[in-house]
Every structure is written in C-alpha cells, then in structure tokens.
C-alpha cells in the first residue's frame, strides 16, 4: 500500500532527491526510538484490548452519502437515488449486489472514493465471498491513501484490515493478501509497535516460504529504513531488484537507505534508476 498514485510521483520525488544530494550533500533520516517492537505473542491483555478493530471508529457513512448528494450534479444524485431504491427493494441478494455495485461505481465516478469503498464493503456484507471481501479491502486501503480527514482515515484502515482478515479466512495461503494486510498495519499504525510487529511477523511467514517475494521484501525493507537498520534495508531492496530490475519503489527506498548512510554516489545512482 505504498505509492499507489503511480510512477509519476516517484519520478518527481527521485528527481528532487537527486538535486538535493547534488546541492546539499548528505541526507539524514529520523530514526524511531525503537527498532525492536514487542512480539505479538508477548502483548499484555491491556495492550491487546487497545488494538484497532473494525467498527471501533464510528462514522455514519449512509448519512454522509445523503449529504454528499447535494455536492454533486443533479443527474449524478438522481442516478444514485435510483439505485438506492433498487437496492432497498431488491428481491434477493444478487439483485441487491448489482444495485450496490452501481452505487459504488457512481460515487467513484464523482470522485468520492471513500463512499465508493463503503459501498464495496456493503457488497461483501451482502454477498460474502472471497473476491468481494478482497475487493472491499483493496478499495478501503486505496481510499485510506487519499483521504484527508483523520477520522475518515482511521475508519478506512480499520475496515481495510477487517476485510483483508475476512479474505484470508477463505484461503490462508494468499501471500499477496498477507502483504497488503501487513502494509495496512504499517501505514495505518506506524507508531504502534504491536501492530507493526504483527505486520512484520506476517511478512516473515511469506519470506519463509519464498525468500525472494517482491512485495514482502519491499515492505520489510521499508520497515528497516524506518527503524534505522539501513544495511538490512539495502539487502531487502537488492533482493527485490534482482527479481524485478525495474521496480521504481525499490530504487527509491534503496536511495533513501544509501543517503542515510552517507553513501551519496550510490544514493544518486539509485534515485536516477528510479526515474527511468
């Protein structure tokens, strides 16, 4: 769940970092106070009880949707109302699911991605399949990346985590789902060690079976950068690049790791490769 806005963002960032290295010299990064978060198994009951869960953050999304109809075109609002009526009067789950998909599509068309994600969750609740929960999880996670309101962001990440966990109940071997779920723990709760460690342990399960897994190594490398373990981060990103030599995100974080270690030329080379 990183850099979902595409290659253009990375090119801009890496270009700026190359210039910064050229004109300003060595860069430093902030190192968190701990690089050895407590193990999930060792959490106290009070800590475990404080961990985020789906539904803990309450938002009346249905009411928000009604309010937002006044912000869009009359044609768009009328279409949404039409399908809302269809969903309410649906004779069965299949018909309701079709109507909810139309509502989700319409909200996304209006660029209210958070509301679209909410309706994808309703789809999964109506027709509880592996694919529907995965779709709901991905939509919630993507919406989290662009949401500006802090309460909305917490709501979205809680529900993304819940949806990914429900997806795994259908098939616990889904490695990509585990990587996405771990990224939710990292990106949603970077300052909460038990959540971070939960993600780390999940990624280690993936690399135990496939030591070269791109997504897992990329995420573990990011965590190593955040905790100041730059040598470990470099090894992770090099593993990724041996398997995927054009991975811009790996080059970006590799450049960050080299820059933090004062290896300016290697950092510049990594950022240059990120731009390609």
Image (cartoon, grey):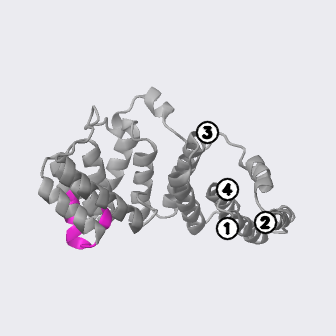
Does the magenta segment cover residue 98? no
Of labels 2 and 4, the one closer to you? 2
Tag 2 secondary structure: helix
Judging by the rendered image, the residue that carries numbered circle 1 is 109
Sequence order check, earlier mark of 2 and 1? 2
| Residue shown at 53% from the left, 61% from the top | 138
Residue at which label 3 appears:
57
In this figure, which residue is indicated by the disc labeled 2?
76
Q: Where is residue 162? Give x, y as percent.
A: 54, 50
Q: What is the spatial separation of the Cα atoms under label 1 and label 3, in whole angstroms? A: 26 Å
Q: Nearer the viewer, residue 210 or 212?
A: 212
| Mark 1 residue element | helix
Q: Earlier in the sequence, mark 4 or mark 1?
A: 1
Q: Percent from the top left, x then y, of residue 118?
A: 66, 55
Instruction: Report whether 62 appears left or right of 130.
Output: right
Q: Residues within 10 Å of mark 4 (few under 14, many from 20)?
A: many
The reply to whether discs 2 and 1 touch (Cβ–Cβ < 8 Å) is yes
Answer whether residue 80 is visible to the viewer in this image: yes
Q: How far, Cα to Cα, is label 2 from label 3?
A: 29 Å
């Amino acid at each position: 769940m990183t850099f979902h806005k595409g290659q253009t963002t990375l090119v801009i960032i890496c270009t700026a970092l190359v210039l910064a290295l050229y004109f300003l010299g060595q860069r430093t990064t902030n190192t968190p106070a701990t690089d050895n978060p407590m193990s999930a198994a060792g959490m106290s009951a009070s800590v475990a009880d404080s961990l985020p869960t789906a539904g803990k953050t309450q938002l009346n999304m249905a009411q928000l949707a009604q309010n937002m109809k006044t912000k869009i075109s009359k044609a768009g609002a009328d279409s949404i109302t039409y399908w809302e009526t269809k969903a309410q009067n649906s004779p069965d789950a299949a018909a309701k699911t079709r109507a909810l998909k139309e509502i989700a599509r319409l909200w996304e068309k209006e660029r209210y991605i958070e509301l679209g994600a909410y309706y994808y969750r309703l789809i999964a609740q109506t027709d509880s399949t592996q694919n529907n929960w995965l779709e709901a999880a991905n939509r919630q996670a993507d919406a989290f990346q662009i949401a500006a309101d802090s309460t909305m962001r917490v709501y979205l990440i809680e529900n993304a985590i819940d949806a990914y966990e429900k997806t795994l109940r259908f098939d616990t071997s889904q490695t990509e789902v585990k990587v996405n779920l771990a990224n939710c723990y990292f990106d949603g709760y970077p300052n909460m060690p038990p959540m971070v460690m939960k993600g780390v342990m999940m990624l280690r399960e993936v690399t135990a079976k496939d030591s070269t897994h791109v997504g897992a190594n990329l995420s573990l490398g990011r965590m190593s950068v955040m905790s100041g373990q730059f040598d470990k981060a470099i090894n992770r990103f090099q593993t990724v690049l041996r398997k995927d030599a054009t991975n811009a995100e790996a080059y970006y974080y590799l450049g960050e790791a080299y820059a933090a270690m004062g290896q300016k030329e290697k950092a510049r080379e990594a950022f240059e490769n990120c731009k390609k």
